[in-house]
Amino acid sequence: MRIAAEDTKLTKTKSRWAEVGKFLTGQTSRPEDDRLPPGQHLVKNWPVLDLGQTPNIAPQNWRLDITGAVEFPTSWTWNDLMSAPQTSKVSDIHCVTTWSRYDNHWDGVTTHDLLDAVRPLPEVTHVLLTSNDGYTTNLALADFASPEAIIAHSWEGERLTLEHGGPVRLVVPHLYFWKSAKWLRKIEFATADHPGFWEVRGYHNHADPWLEERYS
């Protein structure tokens, strides 16, 4: 499945936000809550944000291709994912649309364990993520390898729902959440940077919420 979203209302609206710098505050974190990045507000629910498509991939049909400049390119099935070392993480979500949600419990495989399995070559600098709806986003290798990053199949003790990126999504909690690709389909290790869907539409290449890196 490929995205056909260039002319959608959502894409045009969010690209316009980048042009005008919507939500930018120029502030630092709030003194009363140093966990909350500038311009963010807390929510109890988990809002659903996507490009209008919800791929319906059953776990038994799921595949994760791990390609590019690695010693051991591979394609993981659901059984491969579940046979890999399992880890639980607790982290916050910070969405570029200004909401944050604290203390999310994830289960899955850490990116460090994936890196150990495929062994990126020394010249790798970036990672390009591709989703089952064709969405892409890029990460520096150092961000992908964050100690808190996890390839998650469960949230709050339950399997990830389709609307939140199930069966498998990436979670990189120290960056705005558009970098945590839903419906993860492919991880490509690259020797150069390749900006993804929102990055080529005016969104920041790095996306640190504490520096309010919403837009380029």
Image (spheres, helix red, strand yellow):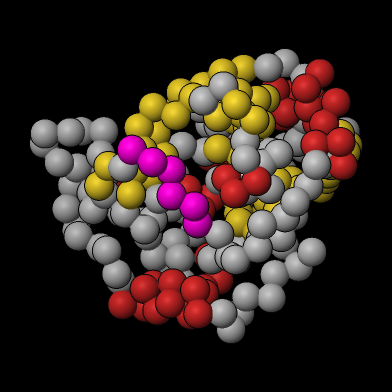
Q: Quadrant of the N terminus?
A: bottom right
Is residue 191 something one can see in this rendering?
A: no
Q: Quadrant of the C terminus?
A: bottom left
Look at the picture and state if 184 lies above or below 155: below
Frontmost residue, 5 versus 151: 5
Can you name the residue that lies furthest to the left here? Answer: 31
What residue do we see at 71% from left, 60% from top?
Answer: 133
Frontmost residue, 66 versus 23: 23
The residue stretch that appears in magenta: 44-49
What residue do we see at 43% from left, 49% from top?
Answer: 47
Is residue 6 something one can see in this rendering?
A: yes
Q: Is residue 64 left or right of residue 191?
A: right
Q: Is residue 140 left or right of residue 183?
A: left
Residue 82: in magenta span: no
* Rendering coords of residue 111 (x, y %): 65, 30
Residue 46: in magenta span: yes
* Rendering coords of residue 185 (x, y %): 76, 48
Look at the picture and state if 35 lies above or below 203: above
The rendered magenta stretch, by its main secondary structure, is classed as loop
What is the number of callouts on the image?
Answer: 0
* Rendering coords of residue 100 (x, y %): 34, 43
What residue do we see at 78% from left, 47% from top?
Answer: 57
Look at the picture and state if 91 lies above or below 45: above
* Rendering coords of residue 51 (x, y %): 58, 65
Quadrant hosting residue 107: top right
Can you name the residue that lies furthest to the bottom here? Answer: 7
Q: Is residue 168 left or right of residue 61?
A: left
What residue do we see at 36% from left, 58% from top?
Answer: 97
Q: Is residue 23 left or right of residue 216?
A: left
